[in-house]
Amino acid sequence: MSLTEACLRKPVFAWMLMIATVVFGAVAMSRIGISQFPDVDFPTINVSVSWEGAAPEVIEHDVVEAIEEAVVQVEGVKSITSSARQGTASITIELDLSRDVDAALQDVTTKVSQAQNRLPRDIDPPIVTKSNPEDQPIMWVGLSGPYAPQVLSDFARYRMKEKLQTVPGVGEVFMGGYQERNVRVWLNADLLNEKGVTVNDVTAALRKQHVELPAGRLETQGREVNVRVLGEALDLNTFRKIVVRESNGATVYLEDVALVEDGFEDVRRMARVAGLPAQGMGIKKQRGSNAVAVADGVKAAIKEVEATLPEGMQVSILFDSTRFIEQSVNHIYVELLLSVALTALVCWMFLGSLSSTLNVILAIPMSLLGTVAVIYFLGFTLNTFTLLGLSLAVGIVVDDAIMVLENIYRHAEHGKDRVTAAREGTKEITFAALAATLAVVAIFIPIIFMKGVIGRFFLQFGVTLCVAVLLSYLEAVTLAPARCAQILDVSREKRSTVGRVVDRGFDALARGYSWVLVRGLKYPVAVLVVGVMLLAGSVVTMQKLPSEFVPSQDQSRLMLRMQTAVGSNLQETDAILKRAEKFVNEQPEVLRVFAVIGGFGGGGVNSGVMFITLKPRDERQKSQADVAAVLRKELNSYPGLRAVVQDLSQAGFTAQRGFPIEFSVRGAEWNELVGHTERIKNELQASGAAVDLDTDYQLGMPELSIVPDRAKAADLGISVEDIATTLNALVGGVRSGKYSAGGRRMDVRLRLLAEQRTRPEDLSKLHVRSATGELLPLSALVTHSEHPALQQITRRDRERAITVFGNVAPGKSQSDALAIVERLGKDVPPGYRVVLGGASVAFRESMGGLVFALILGIIVAYMVLASQFNSFMHPVTVLTILPLSLAGAAFGLLISGHSLNIFSMIGILLLMGIVKKNSIILVDYAIEVRKEGVTASEAMQKAGPIRLRPILMTSIATLMAAIPPALALGEGSEVRAPMAMAVIGGLTVSTALSLLVVPAFYVIADRLKARSEKLFKGRKKEAVEPPPAAEPPPA
C-alpha cells in the first residue's frame, strides 16, 4: 500500500503527520541560530607575532622568513601571505578547501613551535588562529567618564569584560583602545651619570632583587611543606628601595636614578566616543549562536552593570551590526507573509473556493517549517543564504499541491466522488510532479562541486531549497489528497463571484490560446526562429549588464580607514583625526561615531579607524553611498590625511580586507616593483573605474640606523648586547620582570624620560661600563644616520609584493575595474606579474563556479528527465525553454537596473529549475494523449488548453511570491531584489513562450524522429532485400 493510499484510508494519520511537522518546525525556529553569514570554516590560518620596537626589515628576516619556511611544510598549503610592520608580523596561510582546518591548525601550531629556537628570544609567543567572518565583533561597547585612565582601564578589563563574557553565546570580548597597566621605571640619564650607574646595572638589579621563585619543599615526618621565596617587592615604596649599585660605601637605590610610577604601556592607541576618551570592547559571538540573541543578552548585561557604575561613568552601545541582521530577518519574515498572502490570493482567484485555497496554502507552513527543522539538525543557521532559500521556496512549494489539486478538481468535476477523485487524480499527476520536483533538485546538485569559499555558502542555500521542494512533493502526494478527500468542494454554485469571473475569463483565454496554438503548430519552424531571435537579443543584453561580486547594501554603517603622513606620531595623528571626527559628527545622517586612533588592526600610530553608525534609512535623506561620497571628498581634502571609506556590506565573504578591488604586484627587485605598482594604481585611478585606492607600501618612515663599532667595543670589553640593551632602554623600553598589585600581574618597563630622548644627539646621555669599570658614552661606540624606510613589508608566496585595494567608482562595475587591472598587468616586464586577490578572486571564482553549476545542473536535469521519460528526445523538448528563460532574466535585470552578481545568479539558477515544470506538465500529458493514436500536433493541441490552468497557476503563484522581495522595501533587500527580478523576468517570458515554443519543438522533434526512422528502415530494407534474379540467356 502506497503512502498516498495510507493517507486516504487514514486521514487522521495525515493530519497528525502535518501537525507534527509544523510543531517540530516551530520548535526548531525558536532555537535555531541567527547570523548574517553561514558558519563556514575559512581555509585560512593566521600566525601573529609581536616584537616590540623591531623594524619591518628586521622582523621580515628574523621572524617572517623562519615561520614561512616552517609552515610551508604543512599539508594542503595553497598560498602564504605575510606582512611585517613596526613591532608586529602577520603570516596568513591559505589552505585547500579539502583540508580540515582544525587539523591544519594543529599542524601549523606544531611547526611554529618547532621553529621557536630560530626566532629571537625576546619576542612574544606567536599566536596561531583560524579566520572566519563570524569571528568579527558583532557589536562594540564603550565605557567613558571623567575618571583617570587607570580607573577606566581596570573597570573595563576586570568588571565589564568579565560580566560580558558570562553572557550566553559570547565567544570573546576584544579590548579596543585598552592599555595594559605597567609599573613604569623612567630612567633619568643625568642621575644615572651622576651616580655612576648604567642601564645594565638597573636591569641586573631588578633581575636579581625583584624575583619570586619556588624553592622546593621541606619533608618532615608525616607531612610536606612547600617553600616559596617572596623576593618581589610588595608595594611601590619597597620597589623604589631596590639597591641598584653600591660603590665606595654609597648605596644607590632605584628611586635615586629613576621615577617609578603606576602607569601604562607606551600609548600607541586611544579610543573616543562622542569626542571623549573611552575604553572599547568588541563582542564576538560563538560559532552557531544566535547573533541577535547574543546582542540582546549583552544589552541586558549592560543594564545590570549600569546600576553599579560610579557616578559619571557611562556604558553605551557604540556599534551594533545585529540591528541590521535583525531588521533584515524581520523584513524577510514580512516578505514571506506577503508572499503567502499573494499566493493564496492567486489560488483563490483560480480555484474560486476557500476550501481549495486552504488545501494549497497549507503546503507552505508544512514545507517551510519542516525545512527549518531539517536545517536546524544539520547545524545551519538562519542567515542570508538559508533565508533566501526559504523566501524563494514560498512560490515553489505550492506548485506540486496546485498540480495535484487541479487534477483532483478536474476528476471531481467529471462526477467522481472525492476519495476516488483524490486517488485517481493524484496517481495521474504523480509522475509529472516527481519529474518536476527532481528537475528542480537536480539543478542544485552541482553546487556541491563549486570551488571557493563561496561554494560553502551556496551549499546551505541549495540544501535549504531542495529540502523545501522535496517536502512539498511529499506533502502534495500524501497530505494534500487526504485533505481533498475530506474538504474539497467542486460545486460551482458555491464559487465566489470573483471565481466565476475568473472561470469565464479563463475559458476565453483557453479558447484564444487554443486558436493561437493550432496556427502556431502549422508553422513550428517559424515559432522556433522567433525564439532563437529572442535568445540572440538576450546575449547582447547580458553583456550590457554590469557585473559584480555582491551588490552594496545600505546597512546604516560605514568604516573610515584614515592615515596621516608616514612618520607622524600619535599626537599629530590625533590632532588631524579630531578635525575629521568633528566633520563626521556634524553630518545630519550620522547617529554615532566610535574612533580608534593608532594601532587598530595592525596599523601604526599614523593610522586611525572610525566606526560610523548612520540613522535608520527612513530617518535620513541621503543614502549610505551618498554619505560615503561626502566623507570621501571632504576628508581627502584635509592636508596630511588620506581617508578610505569601506563598505562593510562587502566584507565577510572572504578572509581578506573586504574591498571589491584587491590585487598584488609581485617581482624580484624592490624599486622596480614600486614603480610598476604606482603606475598601475595611477592609471586605474585615472580610468575613473575605482576610488579609495590605497596600498600597503609606504616609504618615508624615518629610521635612525645605529651601527656599533665592534672593534672599539671589543677592545674596551663591551659587548654588543650591552650596547643594544642600553639603546633599547633609550628608545624602546625594556621589560624587566613582573609586579603584583590587587591580585593582578603587570609588566615592569624601563625607559628613558621622554624629554631626554627626542634627538639622535641624546645618545651621548647614556653610558656603558667597560671591562675596567670606566663609564663610556654610548655615542663614542656607535655611528648613526637617518633615512626613510618601509613602514610595512608584504610578502606573497615567500616573495615581496605590494597590495593595492580600493572600491568601485559609482556608476562603474567590478568587472570593468578588474578588466582594467588585468589589461594594465599585461604591460609589466618579464619577472613581474599582477595577481588578483581577496574579493577580486572570489568574484571570478564564484561567477565561474555558478556558470559551471548551471551547465552541469542542466546536464543532470537531462539525465533525470531521460530516465523518467525513458526517452532521449523528450528531455530535450522540456529543456528548450531554458535559454529563453535566460532571455527573460536578462531583460528583467536590465529594466530594473540590477547588476549580474552572485545573488542574481542564484535567481537564474533557481529559474533553471522551476521553468522546466511547465514544460514537463505539458510534455507529460501530450505523451499520454499520444497513446490514443493521435499525431504529435493533435496531442499538443489537446494537452495545451487542458494544462494551461495548472501552468498559469503555478507560474503566477511563483511570480506573486517573488514580488515582495523584488520591491526592495526593507533592510537587506539589495541582495534579494536582483534574485527576485531574475526569477520574475525569466518566469514571465518562459511561461508565455513555453506554451508555444515547447509544442513547436515537440512537433519538429516528432517529425525528425519519423524521418530518421523512415530513413533507417529504408536503408535496412535495401540491405536485406535480395537482388533481382538474373534473366536467363536467350536460347
Image: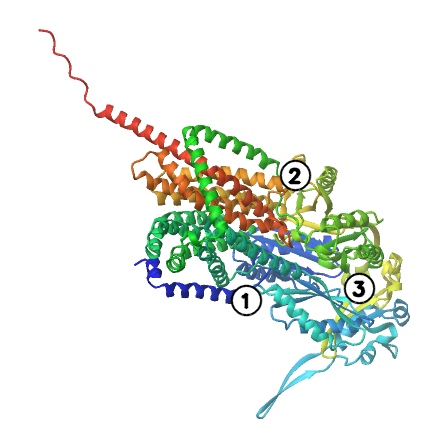
Task: Name the residue that disc number 3 marks.
Answer: 267
Q: Where is residue 816 in the image (x, y as percent from the top left)?
A: 65, 39
Which is more toward the observer, 756 or 727? 756
Question: Would you call the spot at circle 1 few (<14 residues within 10 Å), some (14-19), or many (20 or more)?
Answer: few
Task: Name the residue that disc number 1 marks.
Answer: 30
The amino acid sitting under disc 1 is Ser
Task: Name the residue that disc number 2 marks.
Answer: 816
Q: Can residue 119 be seen in this view?
A: no
The amino acid sitting under disc 2 is Asp
- How far apart are the alpha carbons under marks 1 and 3? 46 Å
727 with respect to 48 (left or right): right
Element under disc 3: loop
508 with respect to 185 (left or right): left
Q: Which of marks 1 and 2 is nearer the N terminus?
A: 1
Q: Answer above or below: position of 898 versus 220.
A: above
Element under disc 1: helix
- Residue at image coords 68%, 63%: 139
Which is more toward the observer, 614 or 851? 614
328 with respect to 389 (left or right): right
Q: Which residue lies furthest to the bottom in this view?
A: 221
